[in-house]
Image (tube, coloured by chain):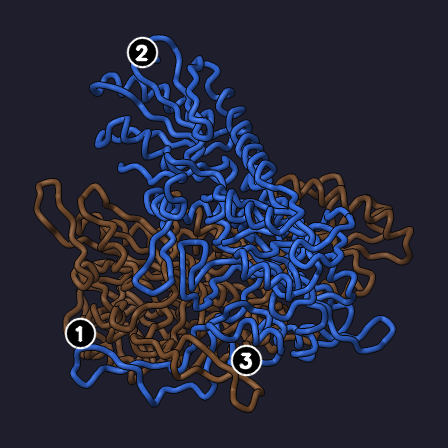
Chain colours: A blue, B brown
Amino acid sequence: MAKLTKRSENYSQWYNELVAKADLAENSDVRGCMVIKPYGYSIWEKMQAALDQMFKDTGHSNAYFPLFIPKSYLSKEADHVEGFAKECAVVTHYRLKNSEDGKGVVVDPEAKLEEELIVRPTSETIIWNSYRNWIQSYRDLPILLNQWANVVRWEMRTRLFLRTAEFLWQEGHTAHATKQEAIEETERMLGVYAQFAEEFMALPVIQGLKTESERFAGALETYCIEAMMQDGKALQAGTSHFLGQNFAKAFDVKFATKEGTQEHVWATSWGVSTRLMGALIMAHSDDFGLVLPPKLAPIHVVIVPIYKGQEQLDEISVFANSLKDELVKAGISVKFDNRDTHKPGFKFAEYEMKGVPVRVAVGPKDMANGTVEVARRDTLEKTVVEQSTAATYIKDLLDKIQANIFTKAKEFQASNTQEVDSYDEFKKVIDGDGGFVLAHWDGTAETEELIKKETKATIRCIPLDMKEEEGVCIRTGKPSKGRVVFAKSY
Amino acid sequence: MAKLTKRSENYSQWYNELVAKADLAENSDVRGCMVIKPYGYSIWEKMQAALDQMFKDTGHSNAYFPLFIPKSYLSKEADHVEGFAKECAVVTHYRLKNSEDGKGVVVDPEAKLEEELIVRPTSETIIWNSYRNWIQSYRDLPILLNQWANVVRWEMRTRLFLRTAEFLWQEGHTAHATKQEAIEETERMLGVYAQFAEEFMALPVIQGLKTESERFAGALETYCIEAMMQDGKALQAGTSHFLGQNFAKAFDVKFATKEGTQEHVWATSWGVSTRLMGALIMAHSDDFGLVLPPKLAPIHVVIVPIYKGQEQLDEISVFANSLKDELVKAGISVKFDNRDTHKPGFKFAEYEMKGVPVRVAVGPKDMANGTVEVARRDTLEKTVVEQSTAATYIKDLLDKIQANIFTKAKEFQASNTQEVDSYDEFKKVIDGDGGFVLAHWDGTAETEELIKKETKATIRCIPLDMKEEEGVCIRTGKPSKGRVVFAKSY
C-alpha cells in the first residue's frame, strides 16, 4: 500500500489520499455527488446511532417529509429565499421517452411540470407547511421532530465529505408555544451536538453564536460548534437555529393559547451532516492513515496471525477465536484476519490506514510464551501482554485510547488558540500557524467583512462563555466588550 | 374519535381513514409524495432495524450512492430502460434567480445542465458504474452491499404507503464471480424477506418466481414474496432479482478469474420498501383501528389510570411506574398515559386506533383488590390479573399476541386459497371472494395477458414449492405441469 503524502507537505492532498486509501468515499460521475463506501458508511452509521439515541433521549421522534419542495414555498420566507433558493437542483419534467434515433432517451417535452420542484436544500418550508395543519392549540405543542435525509445544494467546488452537492444529514424541526421554550430547545440541541462531538468524536469544540452575517437564512440566532483541524483551520461541525416566528408567519401557523388568543408558533431547527466525517478524519488522523476514536470505530480490534503453514495457523486460531469471543461478549467489535492472500506486514499497514484502534499480533513465539503483541493505533506503541489477561487489557486500552485522542486534540486546540491585541499581530498569526485567534471586534458587519477581505479569517463565533472584558477592536479601534473567535475555516 | 368506515362496507375507504386516524402518514402538497408522521415512521424504524440486522448477519454492508443518475446511464441496459426510464423526475437546471417582479424565484435559464439528471427510480445503473472501478479480480468478489434510500417513480395514481411517487426503501446490490453464487444470493435474500415477513410482520407469504412479463426490467429471474390482504387481494411484499451478467455487460464490469481469464461479473438486486407499511396495516387491522404485531409496535404496553383527584392518581402512579420499570427492564416499551386532558374512554379508543398490543387499566377498585385489567388489542379480550404477576403475564401475552396474529393471518390465507380447474370457476372465485387461486396455466405470456384482460387477475408467482402435477391450462386447455398463483393485486 503506497504511503500517504505527509500532512506537513500538503495537508489538503493528505486528506484526499486518506479518504481514498482508507476506502471511505469517492467521487461519482455525477458532479459533486459522492459515493460513501462501506467502510466510510459504517462510521457514519455509528454517528447516526449515537446521535439518534441522544435525540430520542431528549424527547424527539423521527419523521419523513418529501424530497421535493414546490418552488413557490422557497419564496415565502424572505430571508430564507435569499440564502437558500439559488443553487438548487430543479426538477422540471416527469417523463422520458425513447429518442427518435432509438439509441437512448430524451426528456418528454409534454411532461413539463406546472410548477417546478426543488430538491430540498433544507426542509423548513415543507415542514412548516405541514405544521400548519398539525397545530391548532397549545395542546399540540411542542412538536419535537427530526428527519434523517439527503439534501442537495449545488456547490461549485466540492470536496469529499466537507462540501458535496448531495449530502446526508439530520435536520431537527421543532415548534413551541413560547419564545423562551424555543430558545431553550435551540441551546439544548447545541449542547447535544457539543456532547456528541466531545464524547464520541473525541473532538473538543467551542460553542458560540454566529454573527448576524453568518446566520442561517431565516434565523434570528444561529448557534454553532466550531472545531479545530490539524492545519489550524476551523470547521463548523453543527448548527442550531432559533427561528423565532419567521416560518410560522410565512406559512401561517398559529395556535390557540390557554387563554384563547391566537399566536404564531415559535420554531427551531438544527442539523449535522456527513461533514462530520470530514471533521473526524482531519482532526485525529496521521501520516499512516486514519485514527478513529473507539466509540466510532466499526472494528475495534483486529487480530493478525503470523504463521507458517496450516499447523501454526490452527494453533493460533484456537487462541484468536477464544480472545475474539471474550471481547465480543463485552460488546467489542473484533476481526480475526486469517486471510492467506496477504502478508502480515500488508495487513498491518491496511489496518493502520483504516484506523482500527487496537491491533493484536500473534505468532509461534507468542504462542510458546503465552503472550500477544498489542499495538495501539493512536500512539503506535506496542506492548507484550500475557494471553490470559489480554481481553481485560484491551478493554481497558480502548477506553484509554478514546480519552487520549480527545486529550491530544484538546491540547492541540489549546496550544493553537491565542489572544491577540493588534491587527499586525492578528495578521501574523492568521498567515502563520493559524488556529483560533481571540480578538476584540467592534460588533459591526462592515468590520467583519473588512477583516475577512484583508486576511481571509472570519469570525467563527461569539463564544457562549465569553468573558466580559473591555477592549478595542483590532481593526477599527472602536470599543468592544469581549473577544470573539477568528480563524480561517473550511 | 370518530369511528372508521367498516372493512365490510368499503375496504379501501377503511384503509385511507385508518392511515390518517392512526397518525401514520398523510399526503403532502407535492403530488404523490407523502409525509410519514412520527408514529408511522417509528414502525418503519422497527422494520429497518430488524431487516438491517438480518442483512448484516448474512454478510452485507451498507453504503450510499448518489441520488442523481445521468440520463445516459438509463439507456445502457436495454431492458432496464424500457421498464424504468420513463416515469421519472428529471433535473434540468441547477439554479434559481429572483423573478423580475421581485415577488418570487424563477428557474435561471442560464443554469441548464448539459446532461439531464434523473432522480433515481432504482440504483442498478449508478452502482454498476461504480463497481467497474471496484472490481478487478476474483479477490474483489463477492461485493455484498445494501443501501437505505429514497427513490422516485412518477406514479399517476398514488395511495399512502402502497404506491407513492417518492418512497423509502432498501436496495441490495451484489456482485459475484459465478452464476451459481449469484442465484444462491438471490434465493438467500428472498428467504430473508420471507422470514422477516413471517417473524416480524406476522405475515404469511408465498415465495415464488415472477413470470417473464412481470420480471424486473433487466433481470433474468425475479423472485418475490406475495401476501394476502383481508380483502383477498395479493400484495407483492418484496422482490429479489437474479440479474445475470446484464448490468456487468452494460457497464463493462469484468474480473480476472483465478485461472487468469476475463469474465463478466454476475449480479443480484433485492428490495423492500415503505410499501410493507401498507401490507402490515391491511393484513391485520380491524374496524377499531390498527393491529400491530408486538415485534414492530413502537409502544408495547400502555398503562391508563382511572381516577378521580390527585390522591387516587398518586396511588395508581406508584404502582404504574413500578410495573413500567419492571417491563422496561425486560426490553418492553411502555407508556404510562397520565394526561389529565383526556378521559380514559378517549385514551382507550386512541390506543386501539394506534394498535398498541396491550392496554393496562388501573382504577381505585383495582388498587383495593391488588389487580389490574389487561386488554389485548388483537382479540379485544380483557382479563383481570394480580398486580404481583402482571409483568410476567404481560411478557408472556406479548409473545402470544405475536403468534396469534400470525396464526390468524395464516388461517385466513389458507381459507382463501383454492384450487380451481375450469375458467368459469376461476372467474367466479376471482369476481367473488377473491383470494389466491391455484390454477394451471400453459406458460405463455399471451395466455397470461388474456386472463388479466378478462378477469383482472394476474399470476402473482410460480410458487417455489409448486407440486409437479399434470393438468391443462384453465384458459387454453393446453398442457401444464403445475399450478401457479393467480389473484387480483395491489
Q: Earlier in the sequence, mark 1 or mark 3?
A: 3
At label 2, counting other C-alpha atoms closer than 10 Å, the crowd grade (few under 14, some 14-19, many 20 or more) is few
**Closer-to-camera residue (A97/A159):** A159
Give the residue type at disc 3: Asp
Q: Residue at x 60, y 41 (%)?
A: A417
Residue A389 locus on image (x, y percent): 48, 15
User: SS class of the residue under badge 3?
Assistant: loop
At label 3, counting other C-alpha atoms closer than 10 Å, the crowd grade (few under 14, some 14-19, many 20 or more) is some
- Residue B218 figure quarter: bottom left
Label disc, if present, on residue B444 of the rendered structure: 1
At label 1, counting other C-alpha atoms closer than 10 Å, the crowd grade (few under 14, some 14-19, many 20 or more) is few
Mark 3 and mark 2 on one chain? no
Q: Nearer the viewer, mark 1 or mark 3?
A: 3
**Closer-to-camera residue (A134/B473):** A134
**Closer-to-camera residue (A143/B447):** A143
Whether A487 is drawn above or below B346: the answer is above
